[in-house]
Image (cartoon, helix red, strand yellow):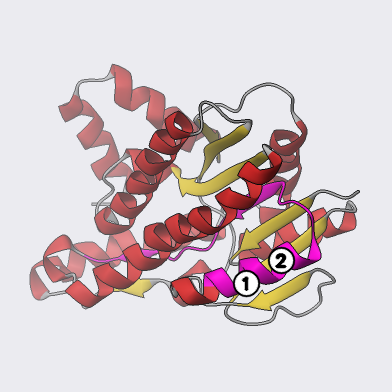
Amino acid sequence: MSKSIIITGSSSGVGLALGNFFQAKGYLVYGLSRSLPSNTNFKTIVTDITIKSEVKKAICQIEKETDSIDLLINNAARGMVGAIEDAREEEITDLFNLNLISVINMISEVLPIMRKNNTGKIINISSIGSKIGLPFRGIYSASKSSLDIVTEALRYELNNTNIQACTVNLGDVKTNIADSRIKSNVSTPYEIIFKKVYEGINQDVNNGFDPKILAPFLEKLLIQKSKLKPHYYFGSNIQKLSLFIQKVLPQKWFEKIITKYSGM
C-alpha cells in the first residue's frame, strides 16, 4: 500500500513542488491549503490551518480514507520583514499563528494516528535564518527558531515510540514568497538602510534554489532506516557555511560579516 503524506501550504512554492513530486512517485498525497492549486493531481483539502477546528476536520477526513499517515510535512509559513521597532502586534501574532501554532495544531491531530500504528515521521520546514538574528528579519527568524526548539522537545517526547521528527532548515528558495510576506511600515530612521537590505533579500530569493530539488532529499528522509537527526540544512554553500562561521568566530567579527552581507 502507498505511503500517505500530508503537506501543508501545498498550493504554491515548496509545498506544490513537494506534492507534485510525491504524487508522481506513487505516494498518496494530501495537500492542505487555503486555496486549490492548479495543474496538479494530488488531493487538496481546502483548510485554514490557523483554525484548529478546520485542522481537526481535515485530519478526520484523511483518517477515514487511509489507514495510516506516514509523513507529515509542516511546510506552510510566511515571511516578515521590517524593523523590530516598527512591528505591529497583530502582524507578529499572525506570523506566529501560522509559522508555529498551526504546526503544533497539525502535530497534535496527526500524532494519535501515527501512535496507533506506532510509525510515522514529521518534517517541519524551518529556515537557516532560525539560527541567526538577521537584520529586518528578526521576528521571522524568531518564529522559525521557536519551531526548531519545539521540534527538539518533541523528539524527546517521542523517544519511546517509532515516530520521528526533525526540521529541514532551508536557505533561500526561488518562490513567490514575497507575495505573501508581511512587510511592516518602515519608519524614517530605518528608511534608507531598509531599502538596501530589502533589495538584497529579494535578490537572494530570486537567486535561490529551485524547490523541486528539495523533494528527493525529503524522500530520502522518509525511506531511510536510520534515526533522523534533529536538523538538516538545505541551501547554498555560503548560507550553510555561515552557521559554521558563527560558531568559530568571535561574535563581533560575525556581526561585521552579517552587516556587510546584508548591505548595511
Q: How many C-alpha atoms fall within 10 Å of the one at disc 2: few (<14), some, or many (≥20)?
A: some
Amino acid type for the residue under numbered disc 2: Ile
Amino acid type for the residue under numbered disc 1: Ala
Q: Secondary structure at mark 1?
A: helix
Residue of label 2: 62
Q: Where does residue 140 sit, x and y in percent of width and height?
A: 33, 57
Residue occupying the far left of the picture: 189
Verify whether residue 65 appears in magenta: yes
Of the pair 208 and 87, the residue shown nearer to us: 87
Q: Residue at x 49, y 54 (%)?
A: 108
CA gap, disc 1 to disc 2?
Answer: 6 Å
What label does residue 261 carry, if any? none
Q: Where does residue 73 sit, x and y in percent of width and height?
A: 61, 52
* Placement of 104 over or under 241, stated as above or below: below
Residue 88 visible in rendering: no
Q: Are marks 1 and 2 in contact (CB under 8 Å)?
A: yes
Q: Where does residue 79 sit, x and y in percent of width and height?
A: 40, 64
Q: Residue at x 69, y 42 (%)?
A: 218
Look at the image and give the residue range highlighted in magenta: 55-82
Of the pair 117 and 91, the residue shown nearer to us: 117
* Placement of 168 over or under 251, stated as above or below: below
Residue of label 1: 58
* Residue 227 found in image quarter: top right
* Placement of 35 over or under 127, stated as above or below: below
Of the pair 213 and 249, the residue shown nearer to us: 213
Q: Residue at x 44, y 63 (%)?
A: 102
Q: Residue at x 31, y 21 (%)?
A: 247
Of the pair 81 and 51, the residue shown nearer to us: 51
Q: Secondary structure at mark 2?
A: helix
* Residue 116 found in image quarter: top right
